[in-house]
Image (cartoon, coloured by chain):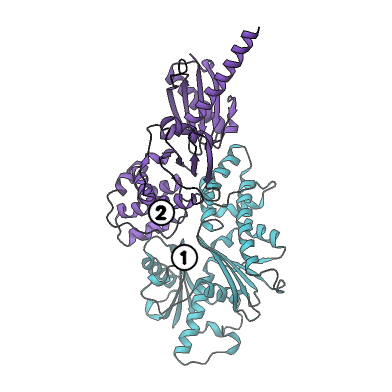
Amino acid sequence: MSCIAGIDVGTGFTKAVLVDVTAEDSSSPREAPILGRGITRTGAYLEDAARHALRQALHAAGRDRSEVVYVAVTGFGRYAVGFRDIQITEITSGARGATWFFPEASAVLDIGNQSTRAIRLDARGKVSAFKMNEKCAAGSGSFLMRAAKYLQIELEELGELSLRATHPQPISSVCAVLAESEIINHVSAGAAIEDIVRGVHNSLADRAVLLLRRVGVGSDGREASPLVFIGGVARQRGMIAALEERLGRAVWVPPECEFVCAVGAALLGLHRWRKVRGEAFPSSTSP
Amino acid sequence: MRFAAGVDVGSTQTKAVILAAGEGDSESPRIVARAVVDTGAHVSRAAERAFHAACREAGLDPREIGLVVGTGYGRYKIAFGHAQVTEISCHARGAHFVLPETRTVIDIGGQDAKVIRVGPEGEVRDFVMNDKCAAGTGRFLANAAEVLGLRLEEIGPLSLQATDPVKLTTVCTVFVESDILSYLAQGRRPEDILRGVHLAIARRTVSLARRIPIEPAVTFTGGVARNVGMVRALEEVLGLSIHVSPEFHFMGALGAALFALDRLEHRAEVGAARHERN
């Protein structure tokens, strides 16, 4: 059976998903048509990471490489993947993936290891504005990773821990490195770990909200439609809570949030593959 | 003999200097002891440890030290200190003491970078410092060393062997890690990567200072001044030669000790005047 691969070569992790070529015909878009997933640390060898993640996804799906008819690649390392059929920006793939899970989505917030992206969508799910913050680690997932490291907590535990905070500690430094001394000071002053972690989430959420406001989210008249939070950081429940508190609206997180750009790439790849083959596709699901 | 001490509580290390007052008007004060300890999480304890270590080094009882001035980011946590002076003033004062012609001080520490314009008497005329981000600080170098699996002391000398320096795409201390990894993956040599790292910090320092004219003599202070690669990179970017005193690491503490000595002498003069009146 033919399938399409979507690979997202991110700065921290490389994600791969396989979707069936009939995915776009699925009557219930929220049921992800994902056949298999793979994830690996990106490291320095970008194409190797892409190959490795794809191999994992094939294994999980019980498919053979020869069944992959089209490879769509997104993420910062997309141009390093020589076996790609098409490259797609993270903005386009993120928006497509998010609207697959939430067709009514009005905005997307994508926080990965090194970059934060805010995307505003129009009523048809098209990107109408976006902003990203990729010059420095302030507001990115690596900020959390570093915080987890010096607090000696697993990254996965941060999210839950943060929800138990009673007196969130302020972190005034925007810089992930300078914040480290602030965190150390809070620890030595005897602050509770959960309060410090929540402070870190609050600081990250402040940056994200600033970015969302700058693309017009919250003033575009589409506040009733879902704001979708994707990327690895969307796994952190404390982060979701911090965002909801600041935005005063619900934040929606798709399952397997770190794979959303890869899913978007695969769906866009499928669309492209069908077009190239001259196939007609149902108008209701065309991106 | 009158003694005074300066304690500089930095983000990474805490330094202490003990000075003996010069005899008469002509003799200048002299350094009788120095000590350095890691700051760690307990700032006040680090200050105490550094101070006591310096006292031991000098063979003095802490009670023999007439006055202690604290400086550095943790200066307000020094429980035994008598006064605090900003590290800006202390670095200027220290640099003027070791090289009176100093008109510019570049101070790069573990988490901070400063450019200070100094007047002929060692007074601060103007200064700029990084406040929002750690770009261009010692941490940037420490991260680069860690990613390359090298010790911090090795990277400066190694960078001087570069033939084809890389151009870094970021000055973010966190992102530089992936920049370095991708250069390594492209097969670039560690010395060329390191030269690129040093040049990036030097350029960052100069752009930090843009509203301050950098005039000679330039004295380079702070822990990063021990890195010969950084000295060369700054010289290349500035087109000036740079002076590094053997006391570079203790410049803040030295300045603080000089301020402490001032106060001590002033107190002695006031005391003497009072004595005469009586």
Residue B96: name its quadrant. Answer: top left
Can see residue B92?
yes
Chain letter tied to purple = B
Residue A218, position as x, y percentages in the image:
69, 68
Residue B244: name its quadrant. Answer: top left
- Of the chain colours in the picture, the one used for chain A is cyan
Residue A178, position as x, y percentages in the image:
53, 47
Residue B50, position as x, y percentages in the image:
48, 27
Please state which amino acid type lies under the numbered disc 1.
Answer: Gly
The residue that appears at 57% across and 74% down in the rendered structure is A95
Disc 1: which residue: A10
| Element at label 1 | loop
Left/right of residue B156 with respect to residue B71 in the rendered view:
left
| Element at label 2 | helix
Write down the chain letter for disc 1.
A
Disc 2: which residue: B200
Mark 1 closeness class: few <14, some 14–19, many ≥20 residues within 10 Å: many
Can see residue A256?
no
Observer-nearest residue: A194 or A129?
A129
Give the numbered dot on residue B117: none
The quadrant of the picture occupied by the N terminus of chain A is: bottom left
The residue that appears at 64% across and 74% down in the rendered structure is A105
Please state which amino acid type lies under the numbered disc 2.
Answer: Ala
Q: Would you place residue A287 above or below residue B79 in this image?
A: below
The residue that appears at 37% across and 38% down in the rendered structure is B243
Write down the chain letter for disc 2.
B
Are discs 1 and 2 both within one chain? Answer: no
Residue A159: name its quadrant. Answer: bottom right
The quadrant of the picture occupied by the C terminus of chain A is: bottom right
